[in-house]
Image (cartoon, rainbow, N blue to C red):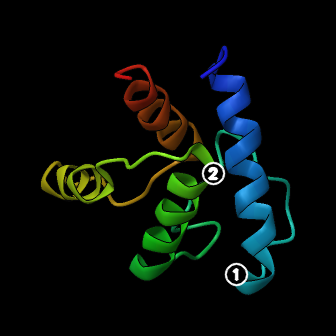
Amino acid sequence: MNEINREVIFGSISEIISSLKDEWEFSGNITPETSLFSELEFESIDAVVLGSMIEDHFKQPFPFAEYLAGLGERGVGDIKVKDLIDFVYLNLEKQ
């Protein structure tokens, strides 16, 4: 892939979320600090759909199940967009 940095990933993720946000009744701007579950009112299935759409966008699989399980094990109850950006960035770098 061409130079994919965190800013490019944020743009992609925010576009994906924006395309779905009518379903979540969120009227604010998506920022790196936006929380998926508390602010966007994601359910677990919404996170799965978002993960699938991110995989489609970047044309590669990501270990989302392991990522979410790891967060649960650490007692992390929410995911900020910036955390998702870091996750995608780190996994893109493995290519």
The residue sitting at 47% across, 60% down in the picture is 51
Please name the residue that numbered disc 2 is placed on: 57
Left or right of 48? Residue 57 is right
Split into 4 quadrants, where in the image is the C terminus? Answer: top left
Q: Mark 2 is on which residue type?
A: His
Q: Mark 1 is on which residue type?
A: Trp
The residue sitting at 56% across, 62% down in the picture is 36
Q: Position of residue 6 (x, y in %)?
A: 63, 24
Left or right of 74? Residue 77 is right
The residue sitting at 40% across, 25% down in the picture is 90
The residue sitting at 65% across, 34% down in the picture is 9
Q: Is residue 46 above or below residue 35?
A: below
Q: Position of residue 5 (x, y in %)?
A: 64, 19
Please name the residue that numbered disc 1 is placed on: 24
Residue at the far top in the pictured view: 3
Q: Is residue 92 above or below residue 83?
A: above
Q: Earlier in the sequence, mark 1 or mark 2?
A: 1
Q: Position of residue 16 (x, y in %)?
A: 72, 59
Rendering quarter of residue 94: top left
Left or right of 55? Residue 94 is left
Q: Are marks 1 and 2 in contact (CB under 8 Å)?
A: no
Q: Is residue 66 above or below residue 36?
A: above
Q: Nearer the viewer, mark 1 or mark 2?
A: 2
Q: What secondary structure is marked by label 2?
A: helix
Residue at the far left in the pictured view: 73
Q: Nearer the viewer, residue 76 or 44?
A: 44
Q: Position of residue 2 (x, y in %)?
A: 66, 17
Crowding near pointer 1: few (<14 within 10 Å), some, many (20+)?
A: some
Q: Nearer the viewer, residue 38 or 46?
A: 46
Residue 94: numbered disc: none
